[in-house]
Image (tube, helix red, strand yellow):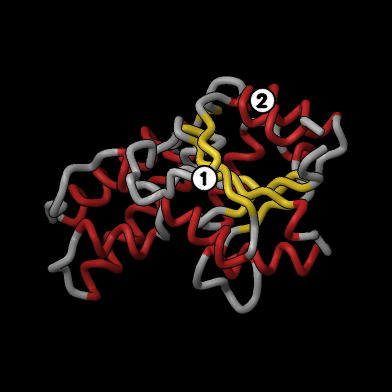
Amino acid sequence: MKFNSIIFDLDGTLVDSASGILTSLGHAAELTGITPARALTPDIIGPPLTDTLRALFPHADAATLAKVTAAFKQHYDTEGCLHSQPFEGIPELLKMLNAAGCAVFIATNKRQFPTHRIISHLNWNSHFVAVYSPDSIHPHADSKGKLLRHILEKHGLASDATLYVGDRYDDYEAAKFSGLAFAFATWGFGAADALVPQECERLETTESLRHLVLTL
């Protein structure tokens, strides 16, 4: 087996969460009476919530951003997150990785509460050794790269035998920061991300990921 540990991003890699996130963002904007600076499209999904809201509402003051944040969390944590659906082939892939003895983790910018709601809703708890969000460690991780380093250290993973799979340039940067091989999930929200180097492993399907991970 080429890699004995694999760490997945969540949004845009394992699950299509766009519908729930965008609906909750729209609800929050409407509730607070402000208009996003750009269209609510899937390519905005991926960065931490604070960064996303600052990009959508660049002229909002701190008080307004706090209201938007609270409105989004209330809607998303109770309703929006449950609209997340696995991408085609992901449930089968997770089962195959488990059967092969691969240690599987999640490292996501999504907050801990909705992340665990999604995992539980999909009945995926048994697939993962651990699931990490920035707010699931102390002090909180201020970058995904630091979150990945925490996972490596906490679980004693060898960086040369661990793969990180994500769908955005930010994921590539996090893997590079942590000394990990990176595979680019082209089915995700950052599929057109021209910043991801061409030499990165590009995954067109979950079958190509299975082959990459499990082939000797």
Measured as percent of width and height from the top left, residue 86 is found at 55, 28
Report which residue position mark 2 lands on.
91
Report which residue position mark 1 lands on.
200
Which residue corresponds to the image point at 62% horizontal and 34% vertical from the top-left?
A: 121
SS of the residue at dot 2? Answer: helix
The vertical placement of 123 against 163, above or below, is above
Q: Which residue lies furthest to the bottom in this view?
A: 139
Given residues 112 and 43, the one toward you in this image is 43
Measured as percent of width and height from the top left, residue 124 is found at 70, 35
Which residue corresponds to the image point at 74% horizontal and 40% vertical from the top-left?
A: 125
Which residue corresponds to the image point at 61% horizontal and 26% vertical from the top-left?
A: 208
Quadrant of the rendering where the C terminus is positioned: top right
Q: In which quarter of the image is residue 33?
A: bottom left
Horizontal arrangement in the rendering, residue 213 relative to residue 90 (left or right): right
Could you tell me how far apart the alpha carbons at marks 1 and 2 are, in whole angstroms? 24 Å
Q: Quadrant of residue 55?
A: bottom left
Q: Earlier in the sequence, mark 1 or mark 2?
A: 2
**Which label lies toward us, 1 or 2?**
1
